[in-house]
Amino acid sequence: MERPPAATIPEVPGSYQFLDADGRIIYVGKAKSLRSRVGSYFQSPAQLTPRAAQLMAAAASLEWITVATEVDALLLEYSLIQRHQPRFNVRYRDDKSYPFLCVTLVDEWPRAMVVRGRKRKGNRYFGPYGHAYAIRETLDLLLRTFPIRTCSDNKFADHRRLGRPCLLYHIERCAGPCVGEIHKEPYDELVRELLDFLGGDTDEIIGRLEADMTTAAEALDFERAAQLRDRLASVHKAIERQEMIGSRAEDADVFGMVADELEAAVSVFFVRKGRVMGQRGFIVDRAEDLSGPELMGRVLERIYFDENPLGYPKAVLVPEMPSGEDMYADWLGGLRGSKVQVRVPQRGAKRRLAETARQNAADSLQRHRLKRASDHNSRARALNELQQYLGLPDAPLRIECYDMSHLGGQDYVGSMVVMEDALPRKSEYRRFRLRNVAGNNDLAAMEEVLERRLRNYLDNRHLPPAERGRFAYPPQLLLVDGGPGQLGVAKRVLLRLGLAGEIPAAALAKQFEEVFVPDQPEAIRIPRQSEALYLLQRIRDESHRFALAYHRQLRGKRMTTSALDGIAGLGPTRRKRLVAELGGVRAVQNTSLEDLQSLSWLPDTVAEAVHAKFHS
């Protein structure tokens, strides 16, 4: 690409974006001065690092957005990376889905449970923890002192309706809120004490338990004193599971990082009130050519742009200072609301914990190297073999596969799954509900799906990337599940839209795993043990799974329509509560108007509409 005139690039903070020939953003960066930073890319390829040279070879244009401060540039850069997932920016892969201990404060009677994945706003989360069994053992100990419920909402409602508590109540692991054995105010106090304990405030709780035990013993209530003694022992055991690394005032996140030329492994320990409250690890794909300090800055962005269940620490301890350390300290201080130190630990317990974090990262990277050596080579081999066997102009870095699913012509759906660099790109998956297909006609269904997808691409290809729709970029191989019939449909759609010379197509038949391509009467037999055929099978099976899952969802929704649907004023929340309180849909049908109107939360007009639905 041509270098823009230097005078046109402003000398202010901002974010810059390199785009490829299709207008797709392939790299996003930030700069304190856009002019000096962008100018560093326009050198002789021999003077650039290998990754920077690859970026400039793939780039066709450059855009930038100016902001007021360097911190604003950091926020804008992260937002653009999350939205566009550029191929030349670093990518993060958590090595596992870490478990958290969640207290569901959004519920009327809060519940304690172990969760993974997405967090729900309003609940409190503690962790992440390295192993689910460890957090479950700790939770079991804590329930002896703070006996809040752990059952599901359905089980809670069942026991409330039956009027009998479950086994956990009888073994003193639950206070029995489902049957009224504890009132709301003391139950909420139990929840508050559990939250304080998990947050690290243990001294006050231990002191209260010891005082209550002494009072019970002096009153000769030895059974109560024994219960408090056992609860106190459980609290001490739970505390012993948390490693103490400093004074009670210590709040810090301790990072360890080990890197090679391609990737880096990161391990983080979360220390609150002097104790290690959780840990996390992930792998960083070094698609950018970054120095150690620059990579450390990317890691901090990864951790603190995500929701932080333990809050922001007073200190961030790193193996080496990030580039722009003042900017990161200001940013984190703004998130915390007070000053945050970013520094390298030099001695003592924090230095030892930092070394433990570094060793964890080294072990994680070693395990990942063994997996990467085989995985990366096989993916590259699969793409090169596909290019060779199918006679493609380039290795197909983006493959799209289409499949249909229905039952007797009902709930007809189509699926599009995407693989980029031979890996699933699930954010690009799309599903289609067929509009114009009558009866059982897979060819017509395939034609409608391909027409909708490719016409959308044509309508949006000339727009700026930020304004494009859901089908912004073309595939380098369009694969359909089926034989010559399905391939003929794909060829016809591509010709009609003028894309036949731009997008190669192929079909994979299930019976003999034969591949058909346009203008070749004979099928291509890719060797059975080749990586290329294995890749085609994986994407074909994934498209079938994705289509079938959507078909089952629509069919299940159609077959489970409730008798309570369509009643004015009875939305999903009221309907769920009504069924739960009365004991089922049939019970609602048989309930009198007076009983319905006696429900304080159900408006009289809605009660009348429900009664009229079944008794008119």
Image (cartoon, grey):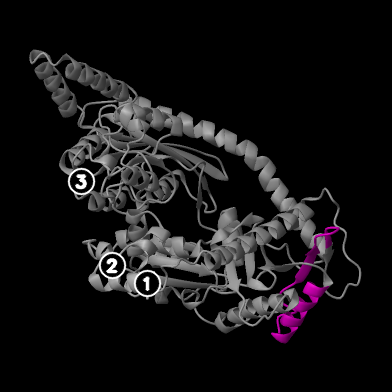
Label 2 crowd bin: few (<14), some (14–19), many (20+), radius 10 Å: some
Disc 1 target residue: 615
Query: Does residue 537 lie above or below 439 as drawn?
Result: above
The residue located at (15%, 42%) in the rendering is 185
**Residue 355: assigned label:** none
Q: Nearer the viewer, mark 2 or mark 3?
A: 2
The quadrant of the rendering that contains the C terminus is bottom left
The quadrant of the rendering that contains the N terminus is bottom right
Distance Cα–Cα, label 1 vs label 2? 10 Å
Distance Cα–Cα, label 3 vs label 1? 67 Å
| Residue 558 found in image quarter | bottom right
Location of residue 321 in the rendering, given as x and y in whole percent from the top left corner: 36, 42
Q: Are marks 2 and 3 in contact (CB under 8 Å)?
A: no
Location of residue 205 in the rendering, given as x and y in whole percent from the top left corner: 18, 28
Determine the secondary structure under disc 3: loop
Query: Does residue 532 lie above or below 109 as drawn?
Result: below
Location of residue 64 in the rendering, given as x and y in whole percent from the top left corner: 42, 71
Label 1 crowd bin: few (<14), some (14–19), many (20+), radius 10 Å: few
Q: Amino acid at mark 1?
A: His
Start-end of magenta stretch? 485-514
Disc 3 target residue: 339
Badge 1 or badge 2: first in the primary sequence: 2
Determine the secondary structure under disc 2: helix
Q: Are marks 1 and 2 in contact (CB under 8 Å)?
A: yes
Residue 76 visible in the picture: no
